[in-house]
Amino acid sequence: MQDTSKQYDAVIKTCRDLFINKMTDYGSAWRILRLPSLTDQIFIKAQRIRSLQQNDVRKVDEGEQSEFIGIINYCIMALIQLKKGVVEQPDLEVDEAIKLYDAEVKTTKQLMQDKNHDYGEAWRDMRVSSLTDLILQKLLRVKQIEDNSGKTIVSEGIDANYQDMINYAVFAMIHLTEQ
């Protein structure tokens, strides 16, 4: 059996490195984004992945991996926004943003390990296209929860859905690197 934890960490390192570089270039401008805006950004990325999976012709020279990285990073930003709230002006320095990023990754990775234990790494037998569809399903759920002002009756909250999307995207990235 492959070492999921090490593979997970390698994917996250790629995402984290890009996050740091973008924070260096743009600062924390993303802190002004409301949750529905972040959800829509994730949705756009997931839709593009699905289009790439279904269409033979590509007009932009970026593949699925860069979009999955975007999904992971936007989900982490959304988790940070859930905890810290939206601001009117960028308010995070790179070091503080990285600490918040790492804290969300730690919690999300633990969730993955717990579920992986219970499900017996079933994701390894799934297709990348199925993981994409699950991300899209989670996005539609998040949109509905957002439309319900964040309220649910029996369902998991928005944070759990963002965490699942991160984990599905990491699994997809692992599959793509193994091909």
Image (cartoon, helix red, strand yellow):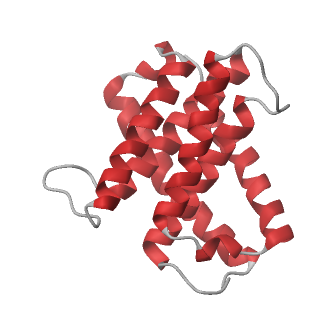
Visible residue check, residue 11: no
Q: Nearer the viewer, residue 149 or 91?
A: 149
Q: Where on the picture, by quarter, is residue 113?
A: top left
Q: Is residue 23 above or below residue 54?
A: below
Q: Is residue 134 above or below residue 154?
A: above
Q: Is residue 146 left or right of residue 19?
A: left
Direction left: furthest residue: 153
In what quadrant of the picture does the C terminus appear? top right
Q: Where on the picture, by quarter, is residue 22?
A: bottom right
Q: Is residue 87 left or right of residue 62?
A: left
Q: Nearer the viewer, residue 34 or 11?
A: 34
Residue sitting at 81 percent across and 33 percent down? Answer: 62
Q: Is residue 67 left or right of residue 121?
A: right
Q: Is residue 126 above or below residue 71?
A: above
**Percent of width and height locating residue 38:** 54, 59
Residue sitting at 57 percent across and 70 percent down? Answer: 33
In what quadrant of the picture does the N terminus appear? top right
Q: Nearer the viewer, residue 126 or 62?
A: 62
**Percent of width and height locating residue 155:** 21, 49
Q: How many marks?
A: 0
Residue sitting at 48 percent across and 16 percent down? Answer: 126
Visible residue check, residue 35: yes
Q: Where on the picture, by quarter, is residue 97?
A: bottom right
**Percent of width and height locating residue 18:** 78, 53
**Percent of width and height locating residue 89:** 65, 86
Q: Is residue 129 left or right of residue 114?
A: right
Residue sitting at 57 percent across and 37 percent down? Answer: 46
